[in-house]
Image (cartoon, coloured by chain):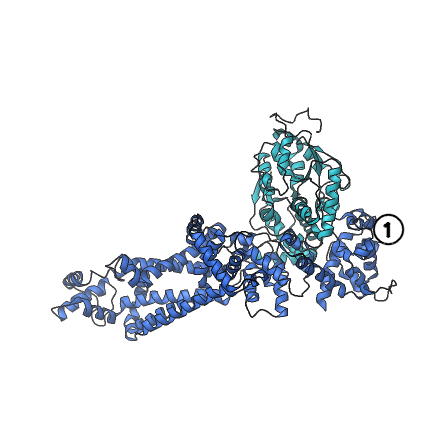
Chain colours: A cyan, B blue
Amino acid sequence: MKFALFLGCNIPARLEQYESSSRAILGRLGVELVDIADFNCCGYPIRNIDYKTSVLSAARNLALAEREKLNMLVLCKCGYGMLKKASHVLREYPSMREDVNAILKKEGLEFRGTTEIKHLLSVLYHDVGTEAIKEKITKPYSELKIATHYGCHALRPSEIVQFDDPVNPTLFDKLVEATGAESIYWQSRLECCGAPLFGTNDELSMDLAGKKLADAKQSGADYLCNACPYCQIQFDTVQRIMMSARGENHALPSILYPQLLGLSMGIDRKVLGLGMNQIDVTGIEGFLSERETSVGNENKNV
Amino acid sequence: MFFTICLYISLAIFLIGLVYKIVTWFFVRPTVASQKIPTSTRALSALKGIVFTVLSVKILTLLKVFVLDVLLQRKVLRESPFRWLAHILIYGGFMLLLLMHALDTVITVAIAPDYASTLNPFMFLRDLFGALLIIGLAMAVYRRFIRKAPRLSSTPMDTYAVIILGIIMISGIFLEGAKIGSYTRYQEMVEEYAGLEEGEEEYKALTAFWVKEFGTVSPDIKEPFEQELLESGKELHEMSCAGCHSKPQWAFTGYAVARATRGIALGVDRAGLPKLLWYVHFLACFIGLAYLPFSKFLHIITSPLSLLANSVMDKGVSDPANIATRQALELDACMHCGQCTARCSVGVMFESIQNVNILPSEKIASLKKVASRKGVGDDEFKVIFNGTYVCTNCHRCTDVCPAGINLEDLWFNTREDMFQRDYPLFLALSPLSFYRGLLREGIPQDDYQKPLNRAREAIVAECDLMKSTDKTVTLTPTDTGLQSGLLISDQASTFSACFGCQTCTNACPVVANYENPKEVLGLLPHQIMYAAGLGIRDLAFGSNMLWDCVTCYQCQEQCPQGVKVTEVLYELKNLAVQNVYKD
């Protein structure tokens, strides 16, 4: 299993722990990652204003991965959605593809549509598989309740992204449960985190985040779990901002999935960047069971 | 005399220029925050900062950065070994030539008292350093003008740098070549150093030896020579010349020129070309020196300063006065190498939005103009601001800048400044503003919100129907072009299938967030679809709903008619912005 790792812009600049923890767990699970230094913005941030430019930006990444004959592993859900969308549009609309390829040609690149785009969670679920993950778990969680946040741009538009069942997705929950934790059901789990509006309409953005946090907390979650830098920053950095800007304290820390999984695999907390989250998540280590065994059959939550 | 006058004039211009540049670092106000700090405070803070830093443990950081980043340039190496080699050759060759050759009477003599420019190892080293520099220069020319990396542009300043260095080097080598063959120069040396006693015979012997072994071209004494004559010439040479003149073959570049031009050496010598080449060589050096503070060569001074300053300064910790000064210095520290642009995350967008200010290496030049006292006009400002905002704040430009310029901070601060002008920036209504939101705690509440409102208001201002309080809308201003205009996105034109069932509106988390959504959002999703279907542009463009859409795709996913609601909203946003630009 070999993928070109697509980090996007936010992770290297603001969420390094997502990269380091992902590399750590994927390394243990035998997924080989190739870095393509030339990767650029996925195009998502400018789509509101200039759709064609966003597709061009995405296309360059796809063409770079294609040149290396690699499929892409994307950590960001907005980036995943954008790349999927662009790939779809470029394959379906020859005129768009011609325009884009005319520009890419100047750099010796071409979009042909042979690269598959996968999100971290889909690789873990479909390519690695929960059984293989469970085998690597040495410290399963017990009594830990996790609220999974799916993320809009991974789920929808479903006909294009094809991540999971858009109405009743289970992929993320199964991955969480592989660690021994319990993935709880909560009403608004498929709703938006509000991040796309942070910076343009902060009040609305914080309203949406606040509602989700309150719902997850009320549904009994100990932690929120994410696999997207926008969602994670929204539930971590922005949740912290909400405390001071609004005096709103949901006290529901958010952890990245590879951090959650990494701890149960016995990976060092420093490698996982546990201390880098703005709202403290180190308490989660208290849920790790001491016994150094595989999750096995006795775990009731699996 | 002429030489000395030129030297002092160019030195004076260089020093005045340098002082002028340094003074501007304390005057230029790159950001609004820095406008409140008087120049005197900035100068004092800088002095205090430097003294305290040098006397603290931070001196170790400075030393480390000086060795690794200034001397060895590891940042360039990390990005491109080719460019590193080119630059190390140019700057290494240049520095060594400057110290050993140009400043020989000051430095070299002090180290080696028996120094003579015609003596090894100096003669060989001079050519070696020169050759290294030329190889580096050729690599740079290849990169900039032949290979042409994507989106790397060359300014007249880049061309000037290559040309002036080229003139200095080529004139130097040709001067050396011409001197090797020059009979006049030979005669001068004989007169000055040889002290031949027996006149004509000895002179002939020595000349024969020099013609044979040293490349001198004599008008009458020509090969072949008798062995005896050469023997006696050699003796004379060893007695009078060898002490301070090594074999010119060691000066391999000059010697190669001398060999190649042997046939015309006499003519060249008679025409006084060696003298002319000498003028070209030292005048080019002096022009380079005098113009240095105003050219890209200023980076020899500013880039190390920027690297050192940035290594010991931290945002939020360091004195704001010093940060302002550092940012002014940084505007001068850019040598337009283009590394930032090569790694820019949005660089490719320049190919479709033809605005050079998207590219960091070009943006910094524009910002310099904005920060200068002259400022820029409205139209130019708009272009600069729009280009500057197309940035995902990915930090890559800052990570790779070989001058250590904190570009990301510079972008952020100058963008905030530009927001102070009354210009609606629509790009602010996109996730490009995400980073700004994360830093909102450092921005005054009013300053933070104003540009966002301004952009929305400017769009609504173009939509007359939105201003009418009359509830009835006539269907006559129907824009039949709207439907055909909504074609770039995948199936965005599907809105005509909408029958107004409101499923999209009911699924929308934004609508659900408000008690009275119409009051806040204007038209709701199903109404926008309907308005678009009827071609009522104003209503479709003017609703807050458009810009408050979180793009969560709930509406689109649930639409029973297959209307691509989110795609339509995306595309309407694009069109609404174009609608304003159109006028």
Left or right position of A130 against B540:
left
Of residue A170 and residue B259, the one placed in the foreground of this image is A170
Left or right position of B305 against A227:
left
Vertical arrangement, residue B376 with respect to residue A48, above or below: below
Vertical arrangement, residue A258 with respect to residue B290, above or below: above
Give the image location of residue A254, x and y in percent.
Answer: 66, 40
Left or right position of B241 against B276:
left
Give the image location of residue A164, x and y in percent.
Answer: 73, 40
Residue at point 78%, 52% (across, down): B565
Name the quarter where the N terminus of chain A is drawn: top right
Give the image location of residue B478, x and y in percent.
Answer: 83, 65
Taking the image as drawn, is residue B564 in sight? no
Name the amino acid type tagged 1.
Answer: Cys
Name the quarter where the C terminus of chain A is drawn: top right
Q: Quadrant of residue B89?
A: bottom left
Residue at point 41%, 55% (across, down): B88
Of residue B230 and residue A261, the one placed in the foreground of this image is A261
Disc 1 is attached to a residue of which chain? B
Instruction: Tell me the residue that label 1 is attached to.
Output: B501
Vertical arrangement, residue B380 with respect to residue A263, above or below: below
**Furthest-top residue in view?**
A298
Taking the image as drawn, is residue B397 in sight? yes
Q: Quadrant of residue B203?
A: bottom left
**Furthest-left residue in view?**
B198
| Element type at mark 1 | loop
Of residue B361 and residue B320, the one placed in the foreground of this image is B320
**Furthest-right residue in view?**
B472
